[in-house]
């Protein structure tokens, strides 16, 4: 899982999650709704209203984390062996065990979201936020340990990823005291986009370079261009946020116009009767 697929697929999930978060934040801002307790559409009643309350975000975390966990377990030929049989015994596959820990944490975070939104008598937002913050504290520790034997380009790539995770951890920590703050939620969505896109980029830099030739650890130009690519990701993801806002605003404008038109038609029919 530590190769190309282990970077691209988790990165794709995180990038998609960031886009979803951005769309939710923009929607609630446009319609003046609550980030924590979005209102149910007026036409959703009965079964639709109950389906609206399901924590699809938590279910997606459970499914995604479980798939990645299973993949890590079975991607090795001899399985996830903790220690070998030599004397003295040595720990085996340290990076794979760290990946497994990360994906188990994602699954557990999904379980917390589902429990809070659908199983507890009243939703506990602090529990959801606290669990997510704790997971990112653990993730940061794992990533710092993950680069102990890295050098050159690989070290630079992972150092920039650690920077994003650290900033995201700070934002999530502050959100414990201001969970409904628009600017914090927007920053969170942007950092998830950065984390996802840069993780995908890391897969191509480290395992499938576009040129077909591996990056050189002893070439300062290669290391400098890693940072340049990271800055390009910052700009591209900022444009993604602007595009998401534009699409959300356009969709809301069309939907509200359609709703007003349908309402006026229904009112005219009732008036005639």
Image (cartoon, grey):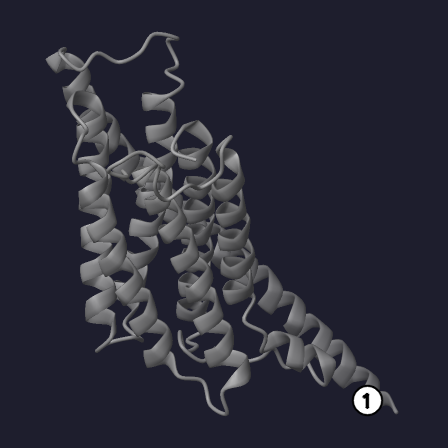
Give the side of residue 23 with respect to residue 214, left or right.
Answer: right
- Is residue 136 visible from the viewing direction of this image? yes
Give the side of residue 3 with respect to residue 265, left or right.
Answer: left
Q: Quadrant of the C terminus?
A: bottom right
Above or below, comparing residue 228 to residue 193 in the picture: above
Residue 113 place in picture, x, y as percent: 46, 72
Give the side of residue 38 with respect to residue 201, left or right.
Answer: right
In terms of secondary structure, where does tag 1 sit? helix
Above or below, comparing residue 96 to residue 255 in the picture: above
Q: How many marks?
A: 1
Q: Quadrant of the N terminus?
A: top left
Give the side of residue 44 with respect to residue 173, left or right.
Answer: right
Residue 119, image quadrant = bottom right
Q: In the image as oriented, which residue stretches furthest toward the front?
A: 87
Residue 89 place in picture, x, y as percent: 28, 39
Which of the pair 20/259 is nearer the observer? 20
Which of the pair 125/44 is nearer the observer? 125
Residue 103 place in picture, x, y as percent: 42, 52
Residue identified by numbered label 1 = 270
**Crowding at mark 1 (Cα within 10 Å: few <14, some 14-19, many 20+):** few
- Is residue 245 visible from the viewing direction of this image? no
Residue at position x 23%, y 26% from top?
154
Residue at position x 26%, y 13% from top?
215
Residue 189 place in picture, x, y as percent: 34, 55
């Amino acid at each position: 899982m530590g190769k190309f697929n282990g970077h691209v697929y988790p990165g794709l999930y995180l990038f998609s999650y960031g886009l979803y978060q951005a769309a939710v934040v923009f929607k609630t801002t446009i319609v003046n709704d609550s980030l924590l307790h979005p209102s149910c559409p007026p036409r959703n009643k009965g079964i639709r209203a109950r389906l609206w309350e399901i924590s699809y975000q938590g279910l997606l975390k459970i499914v995604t984390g479980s798939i990645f966990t299973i993949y890590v377990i079975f991607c090795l030929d001899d399985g996830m062996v903790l220690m070998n049989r030599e004397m003295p015994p040595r720990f085996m596959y340290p990076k794979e065990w760290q990946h497994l820990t990360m994906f188990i944490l994602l699954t557990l975070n999904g379980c917390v979201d589902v429990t809070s939104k659908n199983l507890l008598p009243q939703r506990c937002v602090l529990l959801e936020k606290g669990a997510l913050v704790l997971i990112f504290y653990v993730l940061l520790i794992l990533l710092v340990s993950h680069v102990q034997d890295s050098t050159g380009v690989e070290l630079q790539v992972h150092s920039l990823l650690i920077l994003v995770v650290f900033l995201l951890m700070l934002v999530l920590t502050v959100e414990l005291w201001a969970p409904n703050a628009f600017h914090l939620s927007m920053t969170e969505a942007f950092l998830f986009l950065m984390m996802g896109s840069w993780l995908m980029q890391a897969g191509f830099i480290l395992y499938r370079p576009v040129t077909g030739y591996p990056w050189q650890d002893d070439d300062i130009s290669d290391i400098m261009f890693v940072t340049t690519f990271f800055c390009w990701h910052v700009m591209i993801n900022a444009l993604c946020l602007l595009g998401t806002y534009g699409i959300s605003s356009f969709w809301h404008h069309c939907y509200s116009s359609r709703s007003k038109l349908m309402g006026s038609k229904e009112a005219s029919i009732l008036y005639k009767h």
